[in-house]
Amino acid sequence: MYLSYCSIGFLLIFFHQTVSMKILDRYILKKFFVTYFFVVAILISVIVVIDYTEKSDDFIKHDLSIAYIFMEYYLNYIPNMANTLSPIAIFITVVFMTARMASHTEIIAILSSGVSFRRFLLPYVMGATILGVFTFFMVGWIIPNAAKVQVAFQVKYLKNPFYYDDRDIHFRIGDSTYIYMEYYNNRNKTGYKFTMEKIADNKLLSKLRSDKVAWDTTAQKWHIAEYTVHEFIGEKEEKMWTGTEMDTSLNITPKYFENNYKLEETMTFDELENFIQEQKARGVGNVERFLNTKYERYAYPFAIIILTVMGVIISAKKSRRGTGPQIAFGFTMAFIYLLFVIMSRSIAAGGTVSPMLAAWLPNLTFFGITIFMYFTVPR
């Protein structure tokens, strides 16, 4: 009988602690999400006002209505900006709410009741994981589709007319077919000093030359004028003939010479992967920024978790100086993280390290700092 009463008492105590933990989790999660969305709303509001002030002259010049600007530009700009600000927002959120809890002696009471600091971190990690999963779908599909409209608006109303200015353009358009243009005019969709070669087993099989190749919008084909063809047979035999004009379908269209301003931001995961593979197949080497964008999207959700844990460690201790220094330190660390992200993009574009390593470098750096702080910073 005594053992039965002890068992019942133990179960009641265990049930009470479990319920208390769930109450604590709900309490922290509620504060976490409310503070996060409040911080994001404040930051976005400030940035939208600043952005509108900077671009108001362009809006007036094109006689754009407020409703049109909001629907076409800002409604699609806000999701992208919210994602860009997420490292700052998550850090400020965690530092602000945790520092306030510490100043009100809530954390001391929680830890004194037998809750370990690791257990105290659990609702934060849960909230960060939920935001991380949400962010993954946002950066993978929702934001790129919104960016398509936003970037098109920027190109049309806010940017100078685009001129394709690359020189000595090379493309691989088939297993053994390569084309070359000395330069291309995207205004009249014409390439100059055009060459098309067929190469197999490191041997030149044929070569077509023409002063220009122009895109026929009606026929959706390339029109080649005044061309010369050299065909090589064996080691020594060569045939040559000329023609006045010819229409041909090449595995390339004028869209490859259009403005690629923020092109990587307008692609979903699937579109980005297909584009990278297509560019590699064409022999285009400058795909680092697209690869970096791809890996950044995978790294972003983990960044949210890492910054959340770091924010709790920084701000969990009650300070006699109040919450101001902790919040200021949180701002500093968040901007340092953004600086690391910008630097990693530059490193990836320069080709000095792999785009994957560059994209994960901020996370790896801050993960190491977080582990060090977890074991060294007093709480």
Image (cartoon, rainbow, N blue to C red):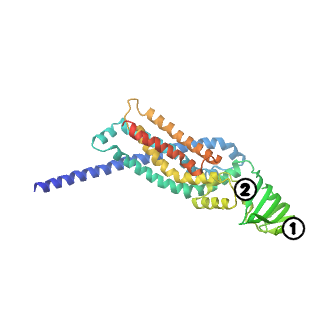
Quadrant of the image occupied by residue 195: bottom right
Which residue is rendered at x = 45% and y = 43% of the image?
93
Residue 50 percent coordinates (x, y) = 60, 41
- Tell me the kind of residue under disc 2: Glu
Left or right of 236, for residue 89: left
From the viewer's side, name the closer residue of 38 and 176.
176
How many marks the image carries: the answer is 2
Which residue is rendered at x = 58% and y = 45% of the image?
344
Q: Residues within 10 Å of mark 1 (few under 14, many from 20)?
A: few
Residue lying furthest front: 235
Left or right of 161, for residue 268: left
Residue 44 percent coordinates (x, y) = 54, 45
Instruction: Find disc 2 in the rendering and name its residue.
Output: 258
Residue 242 percent coordinates (x, y) = 89, 67
Quadrant the C terminus occupies? top left
Q: Is residue 76 visible?
A: no
Left or right of 285, for residue 43: left
Left or right of 52, for residue 182: right
Q: Residues within 10 Å of mark 2 (few under 14, many from 20)?
A: some
Which residue is rendered at x = 31% and y = 41% of the image?
111
Which residue is rendered at x = 79% and y = 63% of the image?
196
- Tell me the kind of residue under disc 1: Glu
Give the CA distance from mark 1 to mark 2.
26 Å
Q: Is residue 95 above or below residue 83?
A: above
Instruction: Find disc 1 in the rendering and name its residue.
Output: 245
What numbered label is drawn on residue 217? none
Sequence-first disc among 1 and 2: 1
Quadrant of the image occupied by residue 254: bottom right
Could you tell me which secondary element the residue under label 2 belongs to? loop
From the viewer's side, name the closer residue of 100 and 120.
120
Residue lying furthest left: 1
